[in-house]
């Protein structure tokens, strides 16, 4: 079965700095795959390379077997690669609904329409409202995105990404800055995503990672360290060394008593 | 009163006044209003690029000039029918924008501003030197009066010319209003707010930016032909840096993103410089300078962005979504 | 090759003089823009103030010139401080609002200056010791321009050393790169920014005092200087002193040598050159010299 995503020797060099260095791994279709690693490991850069925000210096990115390495970002979205941003990146001057409609309209093929008013596109409006309802922002649909709280903006991020009808959803530290209640709600949202959407997730909160992820990739200093199940990662001494240096690290992945 | 109803009433009131104007003021004043309407259209084209799409420009005067000269050439060589001149002028403006736009598209912000400034200045200089076509710095005169529709007589009375210009203004205003309410209009605001994110949700942002650039070029060109019909004279001074700068400043005064704001801003700028300036014997620029300083400090979001409702505290006017 | 050089030597030297003048004018604008992200369109007005000071105060004697220089510097510092104070509330409001304000100030100032000095361009003579032409390599060349190259060159070197080699300069460059970091280090960045504004403005007025015999004061000259400075800043790269120097020297040559070689295209050369540079290097020429 073709992997949803395959990376072959992907690299990103900034002069002599190698932000991502010869990274290769695969992600099974429909899985929830986390990418973790200490700070500076190159996780966000990797996301940018997969989504096409930045072109890779070397290597290939394959989506469901198709080589998308040469494709520009907006074209990759058309093929189903959709990302969110680590620091909320929304259309702050537009309303919450308009944020979602921008994304949904592109998928619906209405974005070049210049004559018919936006409010007349009933189906599109319904899609937008439904998405907002799913992330819990429906009652704020007329508010300016700039007036939302941090947690609400993260919710909107997810709604906008979902509006693009992703096949491969890249969530860049989605739980950052969220309260425990918001994090729990977010994790539930991810679990409820349909099985034909593959989810790739960069996250620092290891509880979220181990609660959600089927498989985990560990990066360190731009290089691929390990890909495996959460149990494999927990048990790996290499990973523990990467996170903590050479000191005793037996406490790193201790599970809290539930 | 319901704000939507209030806006509709004000709009209707303004329209009534505009229609009744030739009976209220003298011919010289009415021709000034014609000029204000055309300048307001130029300001609207700047607003579309700068206020709505977030691309600050000093080059719209170039396409305005292209349209004005095209109108003049068509009027003297092909036909005196106004709408035909306007259509060809709009086309010329769009083509000029399509040719020069790609250079500007490589940049954003101040670099974009400077590139459009360069385009404007080069066009201005060219207008002064292409004597066989533009009659150079002497200006293009001998333009016949405009015929509003085939079969009708040419318009010589200032009041009638004003009605022709008003019709053109209302038509183009309506077209822009429709555009702003469409999905394309929303994409423009997305471009302004967060171009990187717009790409990340699948939009080919450069194609969208270039498209609006050509559309505003067409709008400026059409406005140029109205200028020619109203003035029956075109000179390089009708385009160039001064015109472009004043148009941009009119948009800022009116409130970035607001159509009606740009129109009022345009009127303010022209009236301050020409009308009030007449009272202080040529110190028009001084009055303009004072106007700019006052607006910057007293109306930080421009005329349209200011909350005009009493006691509304910190309520914001969503100028971005309004026409 | 030598023949070509010989024929165009005068233009090239002229170009260096003009380029150095543009540098003194543009460097302040570049720093204020790069550092405070403030677009100051009253910059040309500062030149005009200095040039008018030279016209009014220099009477041919060295003392007159000295007085003009001192007055010019004081006016520049005061003007820079005033502009910094007036634009400070607009710091977060973006370039267009700053443009509106500073252009308004420029319009007002231009009107006042025209009322005081009249609406003609006022040719300004250099001090008595520096009038006339000298003969260099078989060509006649105005003495003042040669002297100007020397002075402006020294000034440019001084500014360059100050910004690239001194600890004060390092502080300024750090504030351009990351204001919050500098502030976190306990330094009052507002003082630094005011200082840079005043310094840049003083350079511009000094440029006006010394440059008046080359580019005489009159209505419209402020607009000319502003446009030239903006082009130099954009071509060189925002916020960079070496960039401003490169850009200024290039534009200086374009406006002199370029015009001499292609007189038919003279009005198109300035913006044509700018477009070519921006198409090739959108961040300005300084990106060529910067290490990756």
Image (tube, rainbow, N blue to C red):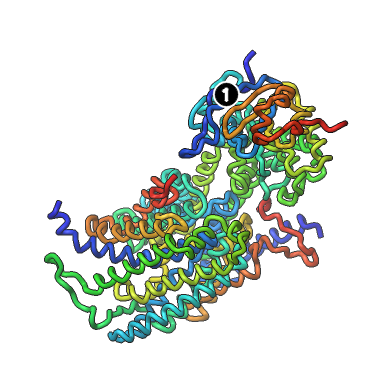
Q: Residues within 10 Å of mark 1 (few under 14, many from 20)?
A: some
In this picture, is A204 found above or below B298? above
| Residue A202 screen position, x and y as percent | 68, 34
Q: Where is residue A252 drawn, in percent x and y?
A: 74, 33
Q: Position of residue B73 (x, y in %)?
A: 38, 52
Quarter location, residue C68: bottom left
In this view, B292 is above or below B236:
below
What chain letter is assigned to the residue under label 1? A
Number of residue marks: 1
Q: Is the residue C96 above or below the residue A180 in the image?
A: below
In percent of the image, x 51 and y 46: which residue is there? B213
Residue position for label 1: A24
- In terms of image quadrants, where is residue C203? bottom left
**Hey, which residue is sitting farthest right in the picture?**
A258
> What element does badge 1 sit on?
strand
Drawn side of residue C262 relative to residue A93, left or right: left
Q: Is residue B29 visible?
A: no
- Residue C193 placement (x, y as % from top left): 54, 66
Residue C228 visible to the viewer: yes
Q: Residue at x 35, y 78 (%)?
A: C120
């Amino acid at each position: 079965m073709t992997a949803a995503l395959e990376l072959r020797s992907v690299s990103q060099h900034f002069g002599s700095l190698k932000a991502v260095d010869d990274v290769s791994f695969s992600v099974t279709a429909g899985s929830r795959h986390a990418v973790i690693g200490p700070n500076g490991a190159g996780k966000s850069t990797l996301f940018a390379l997969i989504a096409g925000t930045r072109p890779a210096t070397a290597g290939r990115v394959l989506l469901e077997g198709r080589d998308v390495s040469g494709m520009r970002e907006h074209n990759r979205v058309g093929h189903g690669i959709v990302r969110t941003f680590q620091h909320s990146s929304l259309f702050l001057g537009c309303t919450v609904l308009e944020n979602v409609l921008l994304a949904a309209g592109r998928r619906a093929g209405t974005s070049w329409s210049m004559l018919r008013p936006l409010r007349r596109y009933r189906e599109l409006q319904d899609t937008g409202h439904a998405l907002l309802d799913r992330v819990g922002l429906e009652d704020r649909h007329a508010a300016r995105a700039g007036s939302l709280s941090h947690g609400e903006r993260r919710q909107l991020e997810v709604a906008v990404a979902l509006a693009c009808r992703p096949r491969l959803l890249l969530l860049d530290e989605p739980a950052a800055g969220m309260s425990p209640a918001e994090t729990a709600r977010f994790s539930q949202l991810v679990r409820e995503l349909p099985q034909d959407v593959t989810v790739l997730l960069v996250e620092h909160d290891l509880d979220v990672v181990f609660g959600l992820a089927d498989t985990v990739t560990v990066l360190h200093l731009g290089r691929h360290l390990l890909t495996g199940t959460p149990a494999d990662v927990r048990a790996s001494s290499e990973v523990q060394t990467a996170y903590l240096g050479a000191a005793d690290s037996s406490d790193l992945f201790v599970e809290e008593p539930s | 009163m319901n704000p939507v109803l209030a806006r509709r009433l004000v709009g209707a009131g303004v329209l009534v006044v505009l229609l009744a104007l030739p009976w209220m003021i003298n011919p010289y004043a009415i021709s000034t209003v014609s000029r204000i309407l055309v300048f307001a259209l130029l300001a609207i084209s700047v607003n579309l690029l700068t206020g709505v799409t977030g691309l600050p420009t000093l080059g719209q005067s170039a396409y305005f000039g292209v349209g004005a000269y095209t109108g003049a050439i068509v009027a003297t060589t092909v036909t005196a029918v106004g709408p035909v001149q306007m259509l060809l002028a709009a086309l010329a403006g769009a083509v000029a924008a399509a040719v020069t736009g790609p250079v500007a598209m490589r940049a954003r912000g101040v670099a974009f501003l400077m590139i459009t400034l360069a385009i404007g200045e080069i066009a201005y200089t060219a207008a002064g030197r292409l004597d066989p076509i533009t009659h150079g710095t002497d200006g293009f005169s001998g333009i016949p009066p405009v015929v509003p529709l085939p079969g009708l007589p040419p318009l010589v009375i200032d009041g009638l010319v004003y009605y022709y210009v008003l019709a053109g203004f209302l038509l183009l205003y309506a077209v822009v209003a429709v555009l702003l309410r469409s999905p394309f209009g929303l994409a423009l605001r997305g471009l302004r707010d967060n171009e990187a994110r717009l790409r990340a949700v699948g939009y080919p942002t450069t194609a969208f930016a270039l498209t609006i650039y050509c559309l505003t070029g067409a709008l400026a060109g059409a406005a140029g032909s109205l200028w020619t019909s109203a003035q029956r004279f075109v000179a390089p001074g009708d385009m160039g840096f001064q015109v472009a700068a004043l148009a941009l400043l009119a948009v800022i005064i009116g409130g970035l993103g607001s159509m009606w704001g740009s129109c009022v801003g345009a009127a303010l700028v022209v009236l301050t410089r020409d009308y009030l300036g007449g009272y202080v014997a040529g110190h028009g620029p001084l009055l303009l300078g004072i106007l700019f300083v006052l607006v910057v400090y007293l109306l930080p979001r421009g005329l349209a962005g200011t909350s005009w409702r009493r006691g509304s505290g910190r309520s914001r006017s969503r100028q971005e979504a309004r026409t | 090759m030598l023949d070509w050089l010989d024929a165009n030597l005068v233009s090239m030297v002229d170009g260096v003089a003009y380029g150095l003048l543009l540098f003194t004018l543009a460097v302040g604008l570049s720093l204020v823009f790069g550092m405070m992200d403030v677009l100051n369109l009253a910059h040309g007005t500062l030149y005009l103030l200095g040039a008018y000071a030279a016209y009014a105060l220099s009477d041919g004697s060295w003392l007159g010139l000295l007085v003009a220089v001192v007055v010019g510097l004081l006016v520049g510092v005061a003007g820079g401080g005033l502009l910094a104070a007036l634009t400070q509330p607009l710091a977060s409001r973006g370039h267009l609002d700053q443009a509106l304000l500073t252009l308004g100030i420029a319009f007002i100032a231009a009107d006042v200056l025209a009322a005081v000095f009249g609406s003609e361009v006022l040719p300004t003579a250099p001090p008595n010791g520096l009038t006339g032409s000298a003969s260099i390599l078989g060509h006649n060349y105005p003495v003042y321009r040669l002297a100007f190259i020397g002075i402006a060159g020294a000034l440019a070197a001084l500014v360059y050393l100050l910004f690239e080699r001194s600890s004060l300069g390092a502080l300024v460059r750090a504030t351009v790169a990351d204001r919050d970091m500098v502030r976190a280090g306990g330094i009052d960045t507002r003082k630094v920014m005011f200082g840079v504004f005043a310094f840049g403005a003083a350079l511009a007025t000094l440029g006006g005092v010394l440059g008046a015999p080359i580019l005489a004061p009159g209505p419209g000259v402020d607009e000319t200087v502003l446009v030239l400075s903006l082009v130099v800043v954009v071509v060189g790269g925002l916020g960079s002193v070496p960039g401003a120097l490169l850009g200024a020297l290039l534009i200086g040559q374009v406006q002199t040598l370029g015009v001499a070689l292609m007189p038919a295209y003279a009005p198109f050369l300035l913006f044509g050159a700018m477009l070519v540079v921006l198409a090739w290097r959108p961040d300005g020429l300084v990106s060529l010299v910067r290490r990756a």
